Amino acid sequence: MLIFGEDPLNVKENEKYFNGLEFLLVCDAYHTDTTDEADVVLPAANHIEQSGTYTRCDNKVQRAVS
């Protein structure tokens, strides 16, 4: 299973989906319950560490500079 930037194991009821899982790869910028259970964790850059633009939910483009 591949998980990017989410923490499904933060919710106890989601543990059933991970029973018997052969391999778990997590890509995240933060240490979470899911990264604790991962076989491999790849570091991700958060919004402060990246340059570019972001489109907000109100469709306005916001520039980010690191």
Image (tube, rainbow, N blue to C red):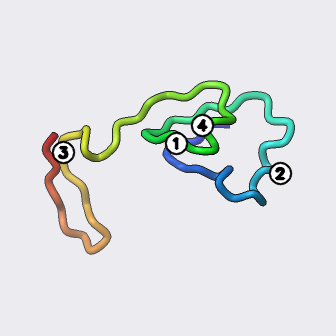
Q: Which residue is the extreme one toward the top? A: 40
Count numbered badges in the picture. Answer: 4
Whole-angstrom CA distance, mark 2 to mark 1, is 19 Å
Whole-angstrom CA distance, mark 4 to mark 2, is 17 Å
Q: Quadrant of the N terminus?
A: top right
Give whichever of discs 4 and 2 has the lower sequence position.
2
Q: Give the residue pinned by disc 4.
A: 35
Secondary element type, mark 2 = helix
Tell me if 51 is positioned left or right of 19 in this view. left
Give whichever of discs 1 and 3 has the lower sequence position.
1
* Closer mark to the observer between disc 4 and disc 2: 4
Check disc 3 and give the amino acid type.
Answer: Gly
Give whichever of discs 3 and 2 has the lower sequence position.
2
Give whichever of discs 3 and 4 has the lower sequence position.
4
Secondary element type, mark 3 = strand
Q: Which mark is residue 21?
A: none
Whole-angstrom CA distance, mark 3 to mark 2, is 38 Å
Give whichever of discs 4 and 1 has the lower sequence position.
1
- Tell me where residue 49 sits by quadrant: top left
Q: Give the residue pinned by disc 1.
A: 4
